[in-house]
Amino acid sequence: MLYAKRDGNGEIVTLSGSASPGADEIVQATDGEVVAFILKNSSTSLSSNYLNQTDAGMIRIVEDLIELLVKKNLIMFTELPQAAQQKILARNQIRSTFQSGDPLLVDEEDLL
């Protein structure tokens, strides 16, 4: 989770990975103003924290993209490196064991 501290004008002045006095507003890493703040301040640790916050969502996108390309016969699953095939198969197997709406499977947006 990211926590924002705002100034008197409502502008984000700091972001942190934990709540602190004055920085207790939970913000999503994908919010436009959060991205703008990160780009404006371009702190290495802040940028790294942003990437970590958005990794889970990107992984799901890549998995879905690979599945779509395979279904449309644009790539063959076996053309992927063996290590990638094993990781994708393992994640697909785990994801398939959960029914949609299962409270154990929560999207990234629900975590923030």
Image: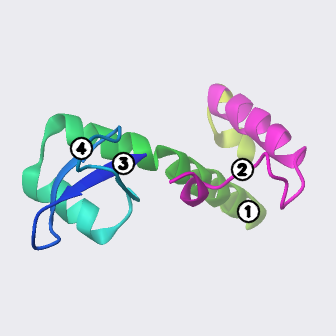
At label 2, which amino acid type do we have?
Answer: Met
Give the x, y percent position of residue 54.
44, 50
Q: Nearer the viewer, mark 4 or mark 3?
A: 3
**Label 4 or label 3, whichever comes before in sequence order:** 3
Judging by the rendered image, the residue that carries numbered circle 2 is: 76
> Mark 2, residues whose alpha carbon is within 10 Å: few (<14), some, or many (≥20)?
few
Q: Which mark is residue 47?
A: 4
**Label 3 or label 1, whichever comes before in sequence order:** 3
Element on which disc 3 rests = strand
Q: CA distance from mark 4 to mark 1?
A: 37 Å
Judging by the rendered image, the residue that carries numbered circle 3 is: 2
Q: Is residue 70 left or right of residue 24?
A: right
Element on which disc 2 rests = loop
**Label 4 or label 1, whichever comes before in sequence order:** 4
Secondary structure mainly formed by the magenta segment? helix
Residue 88 inside the magenta-drawn segment: yes
Q: Nearer the viewer, mark 2 or mark 3?
A: 3
